[in-house]
Image: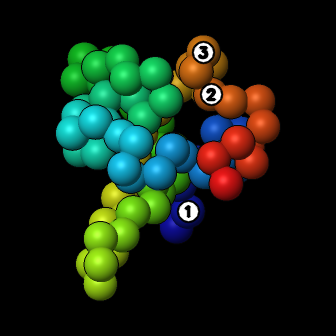
Amino acid sequence: MKPPTLELLQLEPPPYRELTYHQRTGWACCWCGASLLRAGGVPAGRARGRSGAHVLDVDVYACGPTCPEIPTSAGRYE
Ligand SMILES: [Zn+2]
């Protein structure tokens, strides 16, 4: 079973190293940093990270498809 498809999911989230602790744990929007503890979030994909041999990829969340900080170009973080 696949999660609901949102426009948002087409975007690669910011890389792991650019996220705060709260963003990495899914407590805050991976784009704008807003707290998701009350409102909840929507799946925003997987933030990629690597430290030596260790893969640090984490599932991250966003405040919603209308998050003001979502870049218009998905290639921005490449
Ligand atoms: Zn947001």
Q: Please tell me whether residue 10 is drawn above or below residue 66 in the rendered image.
A: below
To which residue does mark 1 refer? 2
Any atom of ligand 1 within 8 Å of the CB at mark 3? yes
To which residue does mark 3 refer? 68
Between the C-alphas of marks 1 and 2, the distance is 23 Å
Foreground label between 1 and 3: 3
**Where residue 10 sits in the image (x, y, percent)?**
69, 49
Say if mark 1 contacts mark 2, CB within 8 Å.
no
The numbered dot on residue 70 is 2
Position of residue 38 in the picture relative to residue 60 (left or right): left
Nearer to me, 38 or 26: 26
Between the C-alphas of marks 2 and 3, the distance is 6 Å
Q: Please tell me whether residue 4 is drawn above or below residue 46 in the rendered image.
A: above
**Where residue 21 sits in the image (x, y, percent)?**
21, 39
Between the C-alphas of marks 1 and 3, the distance is 26 Å
Say if mark 2 contacts mark 3, CB within 8 Å.
yes
